[in-house]
Image: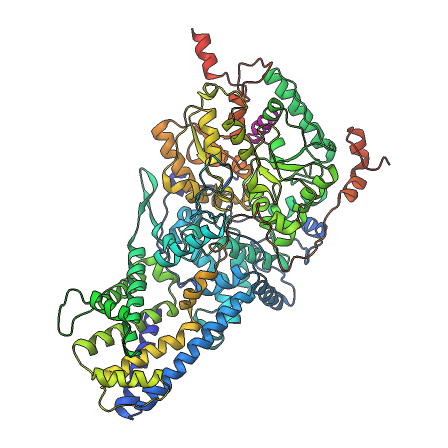
Amino acid sequence: MNALYAALAVAALLVIVSLGVAGANLEFVFGVVVPYAAVALFLVGFSYRIFKWAGSAVPFRITTTCGQQKSLAFIKNDNLDNPHNLMGVLGRMALEVLFFRSLFRNTKAKLKEDEGLVYGRDKWLWAGAIGFHWSFLIVLLRHLRFFTEPIPTFVLSLQSLDGFFKIGVPVAYFTGLILLASVTYLFLRRVVIPQLSHISLVADYFPLFLIMAIAASGILMRHFYKVDVVAVKELTMSLVSLQPAIPEGIGFPFFAHLFFVSALFAYFPLSKLMHLGGVFLSPTRNLANNSRMRRHVNPWNYDVKTHTYEEYEDEFREVMKNAGLPLEKAD
Amino acid sequence: MSDHIAKPEELSKIDYRPGDVVWMDRRVEFRKGTYSYGSNPDSVKYLELPYARKFNPADEDWQLPENWKEIIHEGLKDRLKKYRSLQVFMDICVRCGACADKCHFFLGSGDPKNMPVLRAELLRSVYRNDFTAAGKLLGKLAGGRELTPEVIKEWFYYFYQCTECRRCSVFCPYGIDTAEITMMGRELLHLLGIGIDWVTTPASNCFRTGNHLGILPHGFKDSVDFAVDDLEDLTGVRVEAPVNKKGAEVLFVVPSADYFAEPHYYGFLGYMALFHEVGLDYTFSTYASEGGNFGLFHSSDMMKRLNAKIYAEAKRLGVKWIIGGECGHMWRVLHQYMDTMNGPADFLEEPVSPITGTKFENAKSTKMVHICEFTADLIHNGKIKLDPSRNDHWKVTFHDSCNTARGMGILEEPRYILRNVCNFFHEMPENTIKEQTFCCGSGSGLGNDENLEARMRGGFPRASAVRYVHDKHDVNLLCCICAIDKATLPTLMNYWVPGVEVGALHELVANALVMEGESRTTDLRQQPFANQEEKEDA
């Protein structure tokens, strides 16, 4: 049901852009106003969320330790999984952010009648996630060719590397296909695995469908319903130079693609996609496990009512005396 | 033991399919054996906490205070500001499901709300509804739901079916730690006077008498004196075990079960034998006679109120530094919270072992050293004489406690000690030890009798792994460094893997320890040493 709502929402987006561009000729609205608004919402929303998180205190150093602590000299500290200093933390975060180390640990539990619970490796989710995020990043970087003149060398090399197999005219990009395949996998597992479909919200399906629509519209207009690439670049350059103008004859698929992308940008700060920023701020990962070495200060620390030794001795003086325990005050 | 529990064959038939009912529409059911009793109002009053009342979770009407909704709303708002962990964890979960089959309660029960992700969603759905733009506008469509008394009951049931073990947090790509969510959930419930007695009453005892069991000062002194006599009977060596002694070098703090319950007690004897043998100048304290801290399972304030005694007592007695005994959640507090809450401990000295001269650099701020660090250092420097063959009657496996493994990382110290004090040590499968260790199923205040079925279910993954080494290597001792483990694993083993005993690490240390002037033929449990049997046979 939740998947259906999400699919309907993406379909509604398609209807809106169809009516707007193909029906009402609102090219300027969909080619200029919407993208500007989306980027503005993204920047403001993203910063707002980050500042809001940063405004919450970190009272305690609650590192989740996944390896040997630093203690005695003859016991080797696992500084990447249980960092005790900044270097370790940076290493741990780099592994987490770039290679999804925690997800790489994933296991799958199975209940067997004779053996009880057994655990197997399960790298599928990790592979799907890595494929998805890295290909998305490369696709995004490739798109810099529409926003720069001259095009930086790294973008060009990325592009030729990505089209290495030279299949099709124009060449098909490897990453576009991986993106579509991995996002499809991430969707299918939500539907097929019963526990996952049980926990999945509309907000879990919607971005998947939206990204599918973005990838599909991108691939379609590159290979099947070709658009005027020169005109597209004219438009995108006019957008970055803040002198927006709509050239003639770009073709509808481009506007659909752009609208989906705008929707993603606008939706981003409101959604779970903010894990992009949040992963850097997770206190169980970004703090060193050195709370016994260096004192961590809680900004809102306040005094609490305790039962002092004096009160304790007053209450128990008689029995303490009889047991021969030393006292602060004799009577 | 509770009278209503199914046989292991029945309990191990677990259905992991969540069923078709949408989780928000499924009412919580308080089934006997799967929840803990509500707090005794006297304990709540003693701790000066709000809304003390007699409270049975199975009741229809929970007598919530009139403005309960407002209390929860304000409480949540306050905590979102005070804890970045909560704020970020509310916002960034993508529900990838990696945590789902990592929770021992889910693996043992198949209840979908025991998947860490869904446990967090119980709170997150209310957060979304009340605190996010999408939730306010779209409500249920955005995954939000209204706070109702039914939700409060559900929070109670599932936040007391989480042992705050943090295993899910190891596997989460963003490190989302359900322990944080559970801790916040429990704090919110306490604002309405809702808690469980197995947490509140020990906390109130500890506040008054210095330990969870409510043992009075003379009772503590008696226990220590009794242990000294016992140890003399067992080893022929008379040790000194000072209590409340001013000017000792070290204050030694243990969880109270160590001097009161079995098999903890053998470990307690073990510490005393070891300290005597190396001539450590130490003292126990009656006022700080508890290292364990049930405040951790209650609220941040309670944790701080109970923990404050340790530094206060160290200061009063004028010791130089502190050693802490074998305990899991006690060490989470000492390691990750104590210095921040009740420090700085600038009246103490940076810990240095008087026997080896080793500086415990990793504890230079808190000034508190784990007994395993202390002992491993002694062994490494050859300061004690050990005869591991005295433990040959034990085929040992080691259970990492959740808190020392995932909230500290003390993994190799106990293993190093084990390899030196016994000859037969077999690890459980790799996905069940070290940072991936499984909880005993009874931590965080859930180790009470009325909750037995939930405990046996929660402990099922741990028991499964023990059964593996029991079958394969004849393992007959599950060694651990946690008081809750020692209290609850024997029941778990009896139920799932009969024939496996539970023991303390320092029990094995003392068995192997060759003491000056000793005359002994049995281990601390009065079982003849294995090598002794051979001698007799010859």
In the image, the segment drawn in magenta is B261-273
User: Where on the picture, by quarter, is residue B283?
Assistant: top right
Q: Determine whether A158 is above or below B13 in the image.
A: below
Would residue B476 be visible to someone looking at this image?
yes
Is residue B265 magenta-colored?
Answer: yes
Q: Determine whether B439 is above or below B282 in the image.
A: below
Query: Which residue is painted at 62% across and 51% down in the image?
Result: B340
Q: Is most of the magenta stretch helix, strand or loop?
A: helix
Image coordinates of residue A14 in percent, x first then y, are 29, 81
Residue farthest top in this picture: B538
Image coordinates of residue B363 in percent, x first then y, are 58, 42
Query: Which residue is painted at 55% across and 44% down in the image?
Result: B450
Residue situated in front as seen by the camera: B110 or B519: B519
Would residue B146 be visible to someone looking at this image?
no
Image coordinates of residue B308 in percent, x first then y, are 68, 46
Image coordinates of residue A298 in percent, x first then y, are 61, 56
Say which quadrant the C terminus of chain B sits in: top left
